[in-house]
Amino acid sequence: MATDRHPRDASIGGPRRDHPDDGCIVQLLDEDGHLRQEGEPPSIPEDELLELYEGMRFARRFDERALSLQRQGRIATYAPMRGQEAAQVASARALADDDWIYPTYRDNAAKIVHGLDPADILAALRGHQSGYAVPDGVNVMPEYIPIATQIPQATGGAWAETLQDPERDPDTAYLCYFGDGATSEGDFHEGLNFAGVFDVPAVFFCNNNQWSISTPVERQTRSGTLAGKARAYGLEGIRVDGMDPLAVYEVTRRAVSKAKDPAADELRPTMIEAVQYRYGAHTSSDDPSRYRDGVDEEWADKDPIPRLATYLRDRELIDDEYEADLDDRIDAEIDAAVDRMEAVETDPAEMFDHVYAERTPELADQRAELERLRAEYGDEALAGDGQ
Amino acid sequence: MSTGTPQASRDSPGGEDDLTLVEAVRDGLAAEMLRDDSVMVLGEDVGDNGGVFRATDGLLDTFGEERVVDTPLAESGIVGSAIGLATHGMRPVAEIQFMGFVYPAFDQLVSHAARLRARSQGQYTCPMVVRAPYGGGIDAPEHHSESTEAFFVHQPGLKVAVPSTPYDAKGLLAAAIRDPDPVVFLEPKKIYRAFRQPVPADPYTVDLGEAAVRRQGSDVSVFTYGAMTKPTMVAASELDGDIDVEVVDLRTLSPLDRETIAESAKKTGRTAVVHEGPKTAGMGAEVVATVQEEALVYQEAPVERITGFDVPFPLHAVEDYYLPAAVRIEDRIRRAYEF
Ligand SMILES: Cc1ncc(C[n+]2csc(CCOP(=O)(O)OP(=O)(O)O)c2C)c(N)n1
Ligand SMILES: [Mg+2]
């Protein structure tokens, strides 16, 4: 795969600590959507290329619709993923159905690709707990909001995989998503260290979108790269252009297959630092104009969707008619998801369900108390506007 | 009030401004930073962004990068380094973005900040403040709505304060910053911008450990704090004419103002406590114990606990059922009265 010397931003507060591999970043598609190297194109089948494209287009539209639902008050705080579609969709598409993902609040496209119903995602954003109830057979953990807490858990999940049948290589891999900011938390370091020590079939996928809310990644660490941190724990650390879907797909596929069955000279666990940019606000509650002046052209030019579109058009895999039809299909699918979201209701008494396997006597009393209050005073008085 | 400039004493010396609770927090930080060069603010997004709730808005411009510090995303790092700063001459005010994200720092707080004075027999101390917005009722995502103040109240060596008005926010924060011991300062975000109140421009303190009687009454005493003060006051006025309710805002949860609790409980002989955190082993249990230790023979009814339920804080579609609403508070006050 082609590598590129990646220009690094001027550091804040002094020199960065570099590693010889730090400047390398895997990229297959250049910013204009052309292959960087002459010769053999990557061996991604045509139908897979179309799936990648449709997944990214769906993600972008979902994001736009979710932001507008938020503005209309139909869902609450939303964390947009614009600019990050390639990293999410291509990494999730690189997995087998049985592999697991450990997503954050921002990884909605990855969740959808790996089998979650967009209506469930929207329902949780609308405040309904049922949205976090992942259906059987979908190997997606409920999203993680406390930063970095998923990382040691993914290590544990992957570890369990090696204990089921210690004689065999595991056939399931665990892909754990997190942001650049997460690499500052202790849980990141503990999780990666354990992954190295116990040699678990995990892939740690860092969506380095350059920001954690208002804090730029240069302020998050004095290290030259984030992937370099993984090497300190005995993992392979690799950087990829996170806005290049083909590179993300290839790099993740290799990491996943290596997690299950590494060659003699390969390390089983990997951390992938997908270098990308958050085009939008941190969330719908955030005002980026307080800490940055728009989106740099450098990043605007890397938009993953036109890049892949060009690649596909050059190969005559898509055309205007296809695009128009795709728009219609995506809108219909999202409309249906919004309708399903709006049909979701939560009975307040459900908050007493699933606290323990068996409801305790105290909880039974408290539930009865809530039901008494509702019967006596009505829902409006208990939970209406102004409460 | 203009955004971007902290209302420090210099703007209207001797005067006062109508501030919201969150503006009063910022004003209190600015006032203490002006008074004492060793006071500094550190946390996630407290600089350019002014904090996600704007509680540190404008402080970076006024006090510079060394005293208003955007840290890496690491709560244990924030609180642990604040302890180091505090033991070596600084007066750090650490911001934890939401109370639900303080847990990576729990070890630093309970194993060290709380105990350093005792462990070193007074040789080393930890004059620092950890601020965090807490509480529900704002349609926030999961983990952004909890009230787990009891964890901190339970830990000897920590003080815990919770303002319910802009005036108290500034004064209690100043007292917390000047206090020789570590203080957890919990800000009820539901009422960050709910109302304004005149707040003196000059620095002042509201002493830690002193409750405030918000409403005098003779029939039932209700103890509460933070964002629950409002529905409790609403319940009291709804009952006006039938039941004469006294409302006591505890303001500091540790050390608890046992004297004021006992006095009020003796006067009315019927009591209730309201908080949004879960019931079991919550602040209410401590108030009940205080009443029975200090005023048992005056009591004519069991102490009512009106609290969040003992369940994980629900996602926001049903959070209003979890939080004590005014009617729920009235219902239990009536029960205490009619017992
Ligand atoms: C332990 C913890 N601390 C603070 C927060 C508040 N918070 C939410 S998102 C965020 C920034 C995360 O940045 P990053 O890890 O880069 O992920 P991104 O949001 O950019 O995808 C912060 C500080 C949190 N959710 N959890
Ligand atoms: Mg980020």
Image (cartoon, coloured by chain):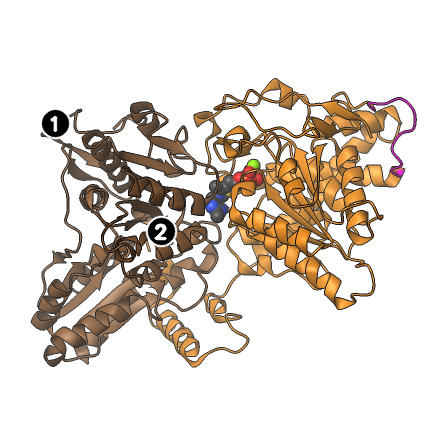
Chain colours: A orange, B brown
Magenta-colored span = A35-45
- B243 to B33, vertically: above or below: below
Percent of width and height locating residue A35:
83, 24
Circle nearer the N terminus (2, 1): 1
Can residue B8 be seen by looking at this rendering?
A: yes
Can residue A141 be seen by looking at this rendering?
A: no
Percent of width and height locating residue A311:
82, 26
Taking A249 as reference, is B154 left or right? left
Crowd class of label 2 (few under 14; some 14 to 19; many from 20; radius 10 Å):
many
- A299 to A162, vertically: above or below: above
Dot 2 falls on which chain?
B
Instruction: Give yes or no for residue A194 being in the magenta stretch.
Output: no
A54 or B202, which is in the foreground?
A: B202
Q: Which residue is mark 2?
A: B134
Residue at 61 percent across and 61 percent down: it is A133
Q: Amino acid at mark 1?
A: Pro
Q: Quadrant of the N terminus of chain A?
A: top right
B230 or A292, which is in the foreground?
A: A292
The answer to whether mark 2 is within 8 Å of ligand 1 is no
Residue at 57 percent across and 58 percent down: it is A344
Residue at 71 percent across and 55 percent down: it is A200
- A275 to B184, vertically: above or below: above
Say what secondary structure mark 2 lies in. Answer: strand
Crowd class of label 1 (few under 14; some 14 to 19; many from 20; radius 10 Å):
few
Q: Main secondary structure of the magenta part?
A: loop
Say what secondary structure mark 1 lies in. Answer: loop
Q: Which residue is mark 1?
A: B13
Q: Which quadrant of the figure has residue A316?
A: top right
Question: Marks 2 and 1, how far apart in space?
Answer: 32 Å
B226 or A168, which is in the foreground?
A: A168
Q: Amino acid at mark 2?
A: Tyr
